[in-house]
Amino acid sequence: MPSGDPDDEYLVAALEHAGLRHVWIPWSSTDPRSLGDLIDVLVLRSTWDYTDNYPQFMQWLGDVDVPIHNPLGIVQWSSDKRYLLDLAAAGVPTVPTVIVQAADQEWQPPEGFAEFVVKPTRGAGSKGAKRFAAADVEAAREHAIELISSGSPAMVQPYLPSVDEGSETALVHFDGVFSHSITKGPMLSRDGVRQMVDDLYVVESIEPRQASATQREVAQRAIAAMPMNDTQGAPLYARVDMIDDENGAPIVLELELVEPSLFFAFDPAAADRFVAGIRVRI
Ligand SMILES: Nc1ncnc2c1ncn2[C@@H]1O[C@H](COP(=O)(O)OP(=O)(O)O)[C@@H](O)[C@H]1O
Ligand SMILES: [Mg+2]
């Protein structure tokens, strides 16, 4: 979205209030090697078309001549949900995930669940994510093959039914410090029917939600497990999305470190916290 998403109005107001200048730069039509003439730091915001142009976007970022936030290594790592395996290996509770890399790879639906999900490892805005009944394995295999042939590995997870009761919670952090949280309604209908915005993302139902102490603790563990190097400190922004498992314990669904909606409207001070983080990076 070349001039930000509706959420970014708050960011622009906070930047202006802080006396910082900004310019929106559409990545796909700007030379990354001349950004230094325009800006001191690049903050990624609404690059929601990058999953359809993945190699081009990564190449573009690689050529950028100013500091990028979040840093390129974090963008590379977190734009492919295979990082869930890294989080799990680091002891962070995560949604159980099987990666399907190749069309001829054998895989089974997760045992003990009425439904499961097949989605791209490189995806955003719920695009390409589908929900299947446990018996519907053939259709699910076809979907996985379709994802792989359109350029992204696929991943298989149990469909965690607590999502339907509103358990999905997004915890927004600036500089590694918890800021605010929201809840998101279920995104995947059984019949696969969905309403898209600009062919970029599925319409969402967002409400305020106070994160629990356990959710905040899981989010901190996920942030601590991110591959930041010693000089980078904490990421400028990190959204940790979680849902409840079958015992009601929060587990990580995904990390949003590239271009997340940050739901500034739900906390009047949130955009100022983001801007404070930008300021120390100039
Ligand atoms: N394992 C799962 N169980 C229940 N719902 C899921 C699961 N995986 C994805 N979903 C639903 O699909 C949406 C999109 O999936 P997500 O993993 O957040 O990918 P992205 O937001 O990057 O497209 C989630 O917000 C959730 O509603
Ligand atoms: Mg999501």
Image: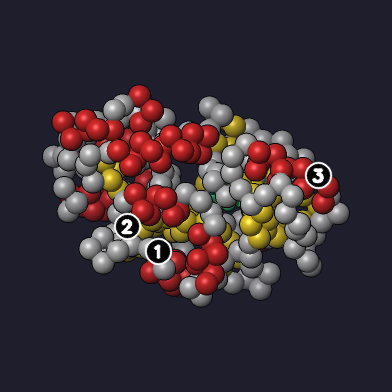
In three-dimensional space, the C-alpha distance between marks 2 and 3, rounded to whole angstroms, equals: 39 Å
Dot 3 lies on which element?
helix
Pinpoint residue 2: horizontal percent, then vertical percent. Answer: 37, 28
Q: Residue 235: which disc?
A: 2
Q: Callout 2, which amino acid?
A: Pro
Q: Residue 139: which disc?
A: 3
Q: How many labels sit on residues?
A: 3
Q: Nearer the viewer, residue 106 or 136?
A: 106
* Other residues around mark 2 within 10 Å, as few (<14) / some (14–19) / many (≥20): many
Q: Is residue 111 left or right of residue 124?
A: right
In three-dimensional space, the C-alpha distance between marks 2 and 1, rounded to whole angstroms, equals: 9 Å
In this figure, which residue is indicated by the disc labeled 1? Answer: 226
The disc, 2 or 1, on the residue closer to the chain's N-terminal end is 1
- Residue 128 visible: yes
2 and 3 marks in contact (CB < 8 Å):
no
Pinpoint residue 44: horizontal percent, then vertical percent. Answer: 34, 41
